[in-house]
Image: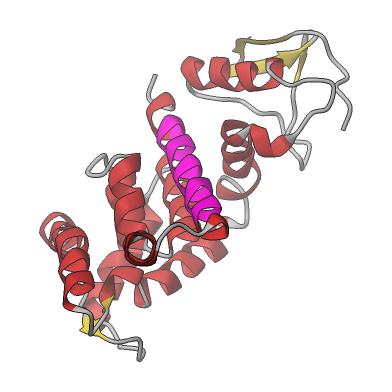
Amino acid sequence: MKRFYKQAEAGTAPGGFVVRLDGKPIKTVMQHSLILASQGLAEAIANEWQAQGTDVIPATMPLMQLATTMADKVKGPDRAAMNIEILKYGASDLLCYFAATPPDLVKRQEQHWLPLLEWLAREHGAKLEHIAGIKYHNQPPDSLEKLNGIIIGLGPEDFTVVQATTALTGSVVIALALAEGYLDAEGAFEAACVDELYQLEKWGEDQPARKRLDHIKSELEAIVRFRDLVKT
């Protein structure tokens, strides 16, 4: 899409803050008004629009993408289906499937994953069991019930963070820890990519693998920015 505006700026509107392009408030993909509760987030999204060149490239505007997802889906009729989808991830969470070998990889997984599983049990009472191997393991029903209650109870902003992080990492545990500030972007990245980082260290750099890791890290950094900006 060609750039069709000269100036992007944040402003106020009934109910919160908006981003205006040449004075006109932007709308979401589904043509909803994008009303933001945070001035900081509105200003950051305006900066994303202003930084565009001759072409508008949505992939370079992660905050805009997260905000529109929140407006179009999280606050809309899709929320119930999204709750179910996230719980499915929780039933087979990445952190619950440890390697059997080699020992140094297992140790690294334990260092990153066990504290997160313990955090979830301590803070939310949801005790997820972990095994060695990839064979599906049924989690305790009461733990999944508690996890479901956590997911349903999330406000739109936190849910947006959790949904985006879960889809990116394959772990609801990492997503909740990130949303609640227990993890930062670097910690989430290291936990989500233990295996991949280990392989690169073991066998040397691989350009496609490194490119994928860089993408995950960049996305997590954007999610954390969104998490922090919605509070300003």
Q: Residue 138: percent from the left, percent from the top?
A: 30, 88
Where residue 71 sits in the image (x, y, percent)? 61, 39
User: In the rendered image of this protein, does residue 202 appear above or below residue 1?
Assistant: below
Of residues 62 and 83, the one nearer the viewer is 62
Name above or below for residue 103 compared with residue 169.
below
Say whether residue 204 is left or right of residue 100. Answer: right
Q: Which residues are magenta?
A: 210-226
Taking the image as shown, residue 76 lies to the left or right of residue 193, namely right
Residue occupying the point 64% across, 32% down: 61
Q: Quadrant of residue 201?
A: bottom left
- Residue 214 colored in magenta in the image: yes
Tell whether 42 sits left or right of 54.
left
Number of callouts in the render? 0
Q: Main secondary structure of the magenta part?
A: helix
Task: Name the residue at 18% across, 71% down.
Answer: 104
Looking at this view, name the residue that lies furthest to the bottom. 135
30 or 135, which lies in front? 135
| Residue ID at (28%, 69%) | 95
Tell me residue 217's x, y (percent).
44, 45
The residue positioned 64% from the left and 22% from the top of the image is: 48
Q: Position of residue 145 (x, y in %)?
A: 29, 72
Q: Quadrant of the C terminus?
A: top left
Q: Quarter holding the N terminus?
A: top right
